[in-house]
Image (cartoon, grey):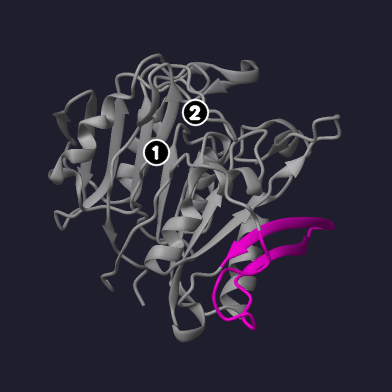
Amino acid sequence: MTRYLFRIALLLLCPIAFANCQKGDPGKTFRFNGRLSVDGLSRTYLLNLPPNYYESSNLPLVIALHGFGGTSAEMERDYGITDKGNAEGFVVAYPDGVPSNGPFRLRSWNAGRCCFVAESDNIDDVHFISSLIDQLVANYKIDPKKVYVAGMSNGAMMTYTLACALSEKIAAITSVSGTLMASSPCQPSRAVPILHIHSALDTKVPFNGGYGMDNVYFSPVDSGLSVWAMNDSCDTPPSVTDGAGYTLTEWKDLHGRVAIDSYLTSDGGHSLAGRTKAEGQGRSTVYGAKRDRSLMGFFPAVYFTVKNRRGHAPLFYKKLYRSAIPR
């Protein structure tokens, strides 16, 4: 397996203005509003190339999926992945879910058994993301073995569905406040490493399963991770480590490599798409965990912050991943 080290970060920062070009060579374009026709629908996305793009080759691609009601622009503005991509040299794509017909045009993803208009209209979002990956790999200097997907809430559910269906195209995923909601058996063609992040206080998508936002029944996170433990050939029971305000459950594959990391925080709540509020009160518990060097070693680097009564506080930690799809 080709080993690769890179980071992405999810930050709630000051709004980032969207421009056609970044600072630098005025003849080189780094920012794109893309459009792709899939299944008779005009699908849209934002694309950011890092400053070193034109002098580089075989760059990683991170696809960042917004939550229900969010947009590509809000995902970029609120989570700061673009800043991290610019600093560390990877391409970032922000696709848009399909909008509803209502006045607010709320966007969603069809992760199988959720969510909203995308599910009820049976939108094939797997086909959309697969086509998007093909288009970006064909037209930009992207390494097809280093395509990663990260998502929040409904977008996080979509990361699981994509890993089930597109494991030959996706190297690893990160799910923040989501769960496996695929409507058909998850049968990937290869093992897909997973980083899962959730709060025990999340009532929108309860970690232990149950009815949450819009009265949808969400599967327990552990049930989905158990499916993935089998898919990733994790034959031994997971290890459980209690940290400062979080619990880490870690599965390893047959070779002793970490295949799945699941972090459950004791506060924090559900960070709503496109907003900086969380359900939980007080600072997020993983403030201490971000200083724990033992947490280093997985994909993607996550600095997830929430705005609560004590101001902005880190919701999660920095983490690295060293992997790509085998060539």
Q: Position of residue 12 (x, y in %)?
A: 47, 39
Figure quadrant of residue 34: bottom right
Secondary element at image label 1: loop
Distance in Å between CA atoms under marks 2 and 1: 9 Å
Report the front residue among 189 and 239: 239
Q: Is residue 30 magenta?
A: yes
Report the front residue among 206 and 74: 74
Q: Which residue is mark 2?
A: 271
| Pointers 2 and 1 in contact (C-beta within 8 Å) | yes
Secondary element at image label 2: loop
Span colored in magenta:
19-48
Figure quadrant of residue 106: top right
Q: Is residue 6 left or right of residue 41?
A: left
Classify 19 as above or below 139. Answer: above
Dot 1 crowding, Cα within 10 Å, few <14, some 14–19, many 20+? many
Q: Is residue 145 visible?
A: yes
Q: Is residue 235 left or right of residue 196?
A: left
Q: Which residue is mark 1?
A: 304
Mark carried by residue 249? none
- State the quadrant of the C terminus: bottom left
